[in-house]
Amino acid sequence: MTDLEAALRRAVRGEVGFDTTSRALTTMDASNYRRVPLGVVAPRDADDVAAVLEVCREHAVPVVARGGGTSIAGQATGTGVVLDFTRHMNRLVGIDPEARTAVVQPGVVLDRLQDAAAPHGLRFGPDPSTHSRCTLGGMIGNNSCGSHSVAWGTTADSVRELSVLTARGRRLRLGQEWSGAPEGLRELVDGELARLRTGFPDLPRRISGYALDALLPERGADVARSFCGSEGTLGVLTEAVVRLVESPRARALAVLGYADEAGAAEAAAGLLPLGPLTVEGMAVDLVPSTRGLPRGGAWLFVETGGDTEAEARARAEAVVRAADVVDALVVTDPGGQRTLWRIREDASGTATRMPDGSEAWPGWEDCAVPPVRLGGYLRDFRRLLTAHGLRGTPYGHFGDGCIHVRIDFDLLSADGVARFRRFSQELADVVVAHGGSLSGEHGDGQARAELLPRMYGAETVALFERAKAVWDPDDLLNPGMLVRPAPLDANLRFSVLPREPVDVEFGYPSDGGDFSAAVRRCVGVAKCRTTSVSGAGVMCPSFRATGEEAHSTRGRARLLHEMLAGELVTDGWRSTEVRDALDLCLSCKGCRSDCPVEVDMATYKAEFLHHHYAGRRRPAAHYAMGWLPVWLRWAARTRTAPVVNALASVRPLAAVAKRLGGIAREREVPRLAGETFSRWWRRRGGRPTEGGDLVVLWPDTFTEHLSPSVGRAAVRVLEAAGLRVALPPTLRGRAVVGDGTSRSALALLTARRGQVCCGLTYVSTGQLDRARAVMRRTLDLMAPVLETSAPVVVLEPSCAAALRTDLPELLHDDPRAARLSARVLTFAEALERHAPDWAPPEVNLPAVGQTHCHQHAVLGDAADRRLRESAGLTGELSGGCCGLAGNFGFEAGHYEVSAACAEDQLLPAVREAPDGAVVLADGFSCRTQLEQLAGVRGRHLAEVLAERLD
């Protein structure tokens, strides 16, 4: 233990982390930069903060204050001690509806404040797209803005008073009329009044540099406002009094279509006199699909408010009439507005991939110019991109003249980094020529501070240095930011990654087969750190259950990044730190769809486990549950299911078996079916009926051995819809599609018996060699099916997802894998595509439950929604993950997290269900979790429909 660590542990009551994991989680924010801290402290209160500052001052160690870690300029990273305010100092102290103020601690997430203010008809004005995870402390440090700044201004406009600790331990209460000003600040300002009155651009989004002009007497000498945007370099915030604004009772969204982004940009300023709440812009190359948008190559999102929906709509329609547009639409439905806004909010992530899949990065993320000059600035910006052979997709706050963009810089080679520097210098000159600010929202940090002399001149930058010295004479707080900055091309996070591709098992087709590129997908926008999910969202259940960064998608990606770098995590694939962080990953695949850049942590986990345990003994659960298909087939062949069930019902025997198998003692062992689905199929006759299209019904392990009733119900419904149902062949060689086996003498002599399997349990436990062997055997068995046009209907969503994604990505060298993947349909998709004229039986009941996480992430549930609607099953299914997630919830040590995940969405939805509601759960894990935690029987949609066929 170092002297610094020991001193901090003696001095503070909060957590002190100098371990590899704690440090690795904070090496990066959402920028291009990486700095390795000595340690991390989570203070419990202001006294803890003061103690940290005292210890670090004595040891001459810098301190960096960190909120949600979503900063895009590198200012939330440091080489000393990082203060994490999200763990303890995250309270909403109180709200005064009469005064329209709130008192918050720095670690409170913006959405928590918004939720608390909403019942009073109030809200905090600024709302960055990261509102579900950014903190008020970070917003004050960066002077954040968001989409509503045209109506409610920046964070600085919303601050009343700030409680601050200086590096030397002084406690200040900052406000107007020099309240709380450190000694020497007033004298500094009085000697530079002329410069402060003339040397700062008059912009709605001037964030760059220190806001020293807020200290002018005619502006109220507002020390709190001047402190905003100082990026943790002047003092450490411990509490804030912020102003709230009245929230419109109704809103409407006018979406205006233009031919291109320049046309949209030039139109934005002309809409401001109409008093909109937002004027946001984005172009077609940032939109995954233009469905639901009006015609055009770029759009303005203009939000209006009113006391009634009619008033809000009338204002939106006035905006449309005033705008010269290609096309337009007005949306008043809140759900429709949320869908459209989600496109805009996800842009900070989706912009990190160009349309061709190549990478793009921040660095020139948020320059701002006067709104009336935005069109001309964008044209100059595009010309500069072309001159340097670069591409980018601008979007952002057009009404404020603030543009966000990710650019396809090559930050992996020396030539690419040199071009990054040249472009940055030239673009800074373009911004200044248009009367703009290098930063219009996210601060300067390391990305832009070096270029501040181009904007302000050397004398004003020298004034910034003098102001920093007044507040922090020892340069203890976030050194290298804003004044005396590090070069903009130093400390790049990519420089430590291996230059040669890492030898891996999966194909990573979206990343050119490069595992490093897959890990680089995580840019740190931290959508995985949200404390609640919206709609059918899933990501990230383990973070919501634990609240710990290490158990978020971003945290795991950071550890994998450090594993590849090899500086902090030094034992590569054998790393216990990475293993422990991945241990609570449910492999729900939610990040594959919910993460704006589609990080696929379930695949990364399987890859890691494969290498981590290569040549070594695995946990018992990997053998017990990873090889589950083998054990269940053995029980079926020996017809010992009744014996297994009887033994499992004897508690002492079950306890021993669970301990030996690495199964949580709190779990009940599911009962094996007395008759497998395939045996029922053969007893029934084993041949398809005459009639319509042939569909091959996949007998997945769970349907086959644990819930054959689902398979039997699916057969009834599919046949009732006029389809001919067959099972896959069970003999390799000459097989006949349509009877589930082959009875010809030649086939029996020349073929070997087998059973199809998607390999899911082997993939989820990282036994990829075994998974590959099982998948190849399955492809051999399915060869006759692939020669036909028959679709493959898979009832278990996790198995369908494995066949859709894991199969072609693990067997990327076998063309049959892609062919089988393309054939896979869900139960609802099969009915919709192959029996489009069939009407399901009327159920006419409310439905509750949860969309399976793999279905949400990989398969989609649009067909299921339409099928439920046709059957009269009303209501929306919840999001999240059930928490059992295959083997995860059964493994020893996972029970508490598994139960917490179920309590997040699924169990409350079931408890609040109306009388007579149907509990839908297509996944075996979901049904098991419902039964074991709530005593509720969930049913597959096929079972519900089959029950009503009579």
Image: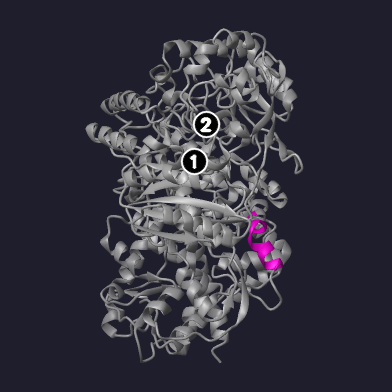
* Residue bounds of the magenta highlight: 901-912
Vertical order, 739 against 462 (above or below): below
Instruction: Judge the density around disc 1: few (<14), some (14-19), many (≥20) Cα neighbours within 10 Å.
Output: many
Residue 907 falls within the magenta-colored stretch: yes
Mark linked to residue 889 = none
In this figure, which residue is indicated by the disc labeled 2? 24
Q: Give the Cα distance between marks 2 and 1.
A: 17 Å
- Badge 1 element: loop
Against 938, residue 64 (above or below) is above
The C terminus lies in quadrant: bottom right
Mark 2 and mark 1 lie on one chain; the one further toward the N terminus is 2
Write down the residue under mark 1.
525
Q: Quadrant of residue 227?
A: top right
Task: Please tell me which residue lies in front, 649 or 845.
Answer: 845
Residue 175 lies, in percent from the top left, at 69, 24
Mark 2 element type = helix
Could you tell me the amino acid type at mark 2?
Ala
Instruction: Give the overall secondary structure of the magenta segment.
Output: helix
